[in-house]
Image: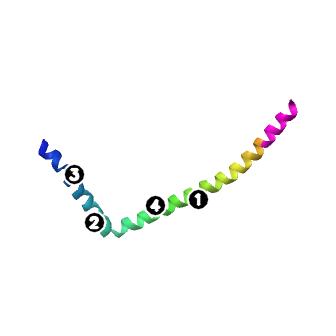
C-alpha cells in the first residue's frame, strides 16, 4: 500500500504528460479549444453589454421610485 502511495505523484505526472503530448498532436483538439475560448469570450462580452444597459435602466427606475417616495413624505 505504501508503495502505491509513494508512486502516486509519478503516476499522475506521467498521465498528465501523456495527456498534454496527445493534445499537442491532435490538431482537432486545439481548434476545439480555440472555438470554446471564443464562445466564452463572446458570452462574457454579451453579459457585460447587457449588464451595462440594465444597470442604467435600473438606476433610472430607482431614481424615479426614490423621487416619488420623497414627494410622499
Tell me how the rendering is colored. rainbow
Classify 67 as above or below 25.
Answer: above
Report, in whole angstroms, how far the alpha carbon at label 1 lies from the one at label 4.
14 Å
- Closest to the camera, between mark 1 and mark 3, is 3
Q: Quadrant of residue 16?
A: bottom left
Residue annotated with mark 3: 9
Residue annotated with mark 4: 36
Q: Position of residue 21 (x, y in %)?
A: 27, 66
The residue positioned 51% from the left and 60% from the top of the image is: 39
Q: Is mark 3 on a helix, strand or loop?
A: helix
Q: Which of marks 4 and 3 is nearer the N terminus?
A: 3
Report, in whole angstroms, how far the alpha carbon at label 1 lies from the one at label 3.
39 Å
Viewport quadrant of the N terminus: top left
Residue annotated with mark 1: 45
Read off the magenta span: 63-73
The residue positioned 42% from the left and 63% from the top of the image is: 33
Q: In which quarter of the image is residue 43?
A: bottom right
Confirm or deny contact between disc 2 and disc 4 (CB under 8 A).
no
The magenta stretch spans residue 53:
no
Report, in whole angstroms, how far the alpha carbon at label 1 lies from the one at label 2.
32 Å
Report, in whole angstroms, how far the alpha carbon at label 3 lies from the one at label 2.
18 Å
Residue annotated with mark 2: 21
Mark 4, other Cα within 10 Å: few <14 / some 14–19 / many ≥20: few
Amino acid at each position: 500500500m505504501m508503495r502505491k502511495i509513494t508512486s502516486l505523484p509519478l503516476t499522475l505526472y506521467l498521465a498528465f504528460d501523456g495527456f498534454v503530448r496527445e493534445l499537442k498532436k491532435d490538431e482537432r483538439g486545439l481548434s476545439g479549444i480555440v472555438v470554446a475560448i471564443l464562445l466564452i469570450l463572446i458570452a462574457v462580452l454579451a453579459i457585460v453589454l447587457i449588464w451595462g444597459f440594465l444597470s442604467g435602466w435600473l438606476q433610472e427606475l430607482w431614481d424615479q421610485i426614490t423621487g416619488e417616495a420623497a414627494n410622499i413624505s
